Image (cartoon, rainbow, N blue to C red):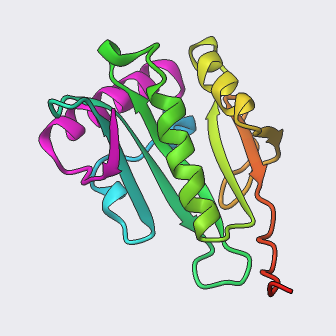
Amino acid sequence: MKISLDSPARDDVRRLLDEHLTDMFATSPAESVHALDHSALLAPTITFWTARDDDGTLLGCGALSELRPGTEACEGEIKSMRTAGQARGRGVASELLTEVLAEARRREYARVSLETGTQDYFVAARRLYARHGFTECGPFGSYTLDPHSVFMTLELPAPQPRTAAP
């Protein structure tokens, strides 16, 4: 599996994101769907990755949205995590999440947060995030309390200053 920066406008990615949105609207009330379509994922504050097999087959995608850009306490939000049906159970989401979190650490974000659903459909996602250290929190950014949303966050330790060798 190869994870790399990619465009949400690619045909196969658009199909996966369309499938994701269809599932979100089938699972949650429209006012509780916060998933982004491919065009919204092209925003300059969003970094987008895909996971692909050696032959280029799309396995999944994920994005990191920068919250409060240009401020000292920058934060990130996980967006559009999706594993293709034929790739589920292969660790794709975990690998993508690891890459997204590594980038958040490189950017020295104070925390990374996300919104997911409360329905049974989202149990696997909530377990994935909990395994990576995310804990439930209140709404963040522009979100408000919603009985169909679970908010989770991961505090990232501040980088340690380098000390000169003796």
Q: Position of residue 89 (x, y in %)?
A: 46, 13
Relative vertical location of residue 27 with respect to residue 155 in this rendering, above or below: above
Quarter that holds the N terminus? top left
Q: Position of residue 92 (x, y in %)?
A: 44, 28
Of the pair 30 and 56, the residue shown nearer to us? 56
Q: Residue at horizontal 65%, vertical 60%?
A: 142
Of the pair 163 and 42, the residue shown nearer to us? 163
Q: Write down the quadrant of residue 69 in the picture.
A: bottom right
Indicate left or right for 36 with 148 as reference: left
Q: Residue at horizontal 55%, vertical 66%?
A: 66
Q: How many marks?
A: 0
Relative vertical location of residue 138 with respect to residue 81 in this rendering, above or below: below
> Residue at the front extreme?
166
Of the pair 121 and 147, the residue shown nearer to us? 121
Q: Residue at horizontal 77%, vertical 38%?
A: 133
> Residue at the right extreme?
166
Q: Residue at horizontal 38%, vertical 72%?
A: 44
Relative vertical location of residue 67 with respect to residue 48 in this rendering, above or below: below
Relative vertical location of residue 33 with respect to residue 70 in this rendering, above or below: above
Q: Write down the quadrant of residue 82 in the picture.
A: top left
Q: Where is residue 2 in the image (x, y as percent from the top left)?
A: 32, 39
Indicate left or right for 149 with 93 as reference: right
- Which residues make up the magenta segment? 1-29
Q: Position of residue 117 (x, y in %)?
A: 62, 28
Residue 10 part of the magenta-drawn span: yes
Residue 112 part of the magenta-drawn span: no
Quarter that holds the C terminus? bottom right
